[in-house]
Amino acid sequence: MITLGARHQAFWDLHQSGCFVIPNPWDAGSARMMAAAGAKALATTSAGFAFTLGRPDMGHVTRDEALAHCEQIVAATGLPVSGDLENGFADDPDDVAETVRLAAEAGLSGCSIEDTQMVDGNPAYEFEFAVERIRAAVSAARRLGRPFVLCARADGVMNGVYAIDEAVRRIRAFEQAGADLLYVPVPPGLDELRMVLSAVSKPVNALAVGPLSSVSLAEFSALGVRRISLGSAVARATHAVIRDRMREILDDGDFTGLRSVASGSQIDAMLRKGSGGKDNGSSERG
């Protein structure tokens, strides 16, 4: 079985060269299927997890719930895992640092911290305060004494609260504060993604949704993107199947959409393969 220490180092090494896809599972089963499909690492999705609890995205999951979920994803496979920890579940920099410490205790190999608040409208933290929060998160990560990839997110473009120029200003400051990975979700297009990539020297994460969903892995790699995440897109695609099949069945009495499904044996095989030799009771920590 791959130890957590080896996973942490492998995750760090993935960010040093090349370009890789990091899928986002929302439960142990989806994590194992993604691992079986060949993923090199996984990242949680705050939206996907909230959906499993019957809650909306953004600010409706507690830190304790999110960290317990992260532990479950870590335990599900032998792959390294990064945590989507929203705004660190806190405003105060010291509390964000505590979230990073707890994330490491949960077995995560990295995590992301956003610069917008988990309230209606998702207003951005004031610039200097946003940088202070990342600086505190980085300090906590460095005190761990082992590899931990701290991703600093500038979410204001996605949330519609600031433009790409401000996002670039922020990721430059986050890089200077020590972040290992920079992330501007959903830039308007490739020109804006190029602006992000040229603004910093540290690795950049890109989200393959919206205007970037038509960009291939080879094209992302050629641009210089180091990591490609899927966010909640696969979870939402799964929920779209639930929506569409239920409309067909309950509104129209049409069951034909159920013809195209994976067999139980196929799913069972992927779950076994994706487990990485781990059983459901695994509680490896570190």
Image (spheres, grey):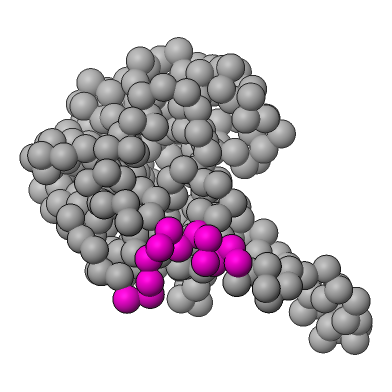
Name the quarter where the C terminus is drawn: bottom left
Q: Is residue 178 visible?
A: yes
Q: Is residue 133 visible?
A: no
Where in the figure is residue 97, as x and y percent of width and height?
Answer: 15, 47
Name the quarter where the N terminus is drawn: bottom left
Where in the figure is residue 165, as x and y percent of width and height?
Answer: 45, 21
Q: Is residue 209 left or right of residue 174?
A: right
Q: Specify whether residue 233 is painted magenta.
A: no
Q: Residue at x 45, y 67 (%)?
A: 28
Q: Specify whether residue 271 is painted magenta.
A: yes
Where in the figure is residue 209, as x and y percent of width and height?
Answer: 62, 42
Q: Which residues are magenta?
A: 269-281
Q: In the depicted view, which residue is nearer to us: 222 or 92?
A: 222
Q: Residue at x 53, y 60 (%)?
A: 273
Q: Residue at x 50, y 59 (%)?
A: 274
Q: Quadrant of residue 190?
A: top right
* Placement of 190 over or under 79, stated as above or below: above
